[in-house]
Image (cartoon, rainbow, N blue to C red):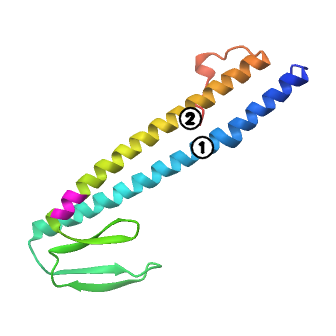
Amino acid sequence: MTSGNPNIDEKVLQYETFINEVLRRDLQRVLEQRDAVYEKISQYLQLKNVIESLQESGSKELKTEVDLGCNFYVQAHVEDSSKIFVAIGYGFYVELTLPEALKFIEKKTTQLTTYTEALTKDSAKIKANIRMVLEGLRELQGLKDLPEEMRREVL
């Protein structure tokens, strides 16, 4: 629906471009970051479960399979499983005892959970900005409000 006024049509086009090229891209980026952080949390929780099962078994020896890449597994024999190497970030690994590793995992998952909450708030702000610009476009074009049941989520 065009109003016939070239200035208004130009503004509408600018706002639509802003929504599609800036706001939606930013929203997608934030949601991808949040998903990546959730994946890290999942990996740390898996490690926590493995450590707890090692502690419950009480055995020092461990037989396992190690993925060398491309789903190629080899059998491994660990003589002393009282210490493990934990990825702490930026490609660094630290040798920790099992209780130390559990403490680290608890702190790291708390930190990552706080970060996901911040990313969720950021995505809500971006969605609100998209909604506000869409409402501005509606007013610019002179369209009437849609009934509440006809409205849909922004993304």
Considering only vertical position in the picture, is 149 above or below 51? above
Q: Main secondary structure of the magenta part?
A: helix
Q: Is residue 101 visible?
A: yes
Task: Point out residue 82 in the picture as x, y percentages from the top left corner.
Answer: 14, 74
Residue at the disc numbered 1: 26
Left or right: where 65 falls relative to 140: left
How packed mark 2 is, by other alpha carbons closer than 10 Å (few <14, some 14-19, many 20 or more), is: some
Residue at the disc numbered 2: 126
**Disc 2 to disc 1, C-alpha distance:** 8 Å
- Is 139 one of the magenta-colored residues? no
Considering only vertical position in the picture, is 113 above or below 12? below
- The C terminus - image quarter: top right
Residue numbers of the magenta segment: 100-104
- Which mark, residue 137? none
Residue drawn at the location 73% of the way across and 23% of the way down:
137
- The N terminus - image quarter: top right
Quarter where residue 88 is shown:
bottom left
Instruction: Look at the numbered disc 2 and give the secondary structure of its residue.
Output: helix
Task: Point out residue 37 in the picture as x, y percentages from the top left corner.
Answer: 42, 53
Instruction: Look at the numbered disc 1 and give the secondary structure of its residue.
Output: helix
Task: Point out residue 89 in the picture as x, y percentages from the top left corner.
Answer: 37, 64
Asked whether the residues under the numbered discs 2 and 1 touch, taking CB atoms below 8 Å apart as contact, a structural biologist would say: yes
How packed mark 1 is, by other alpha carbons closer than 10 Å (few <14, some 14-19, many 20 or more), is: some
Considering only vertical position in the picture, is 8 above or below 120? above
Q: Amino acid at mark 2?
A: Ile
Q: Amino acid at mark 1?
A: Asp
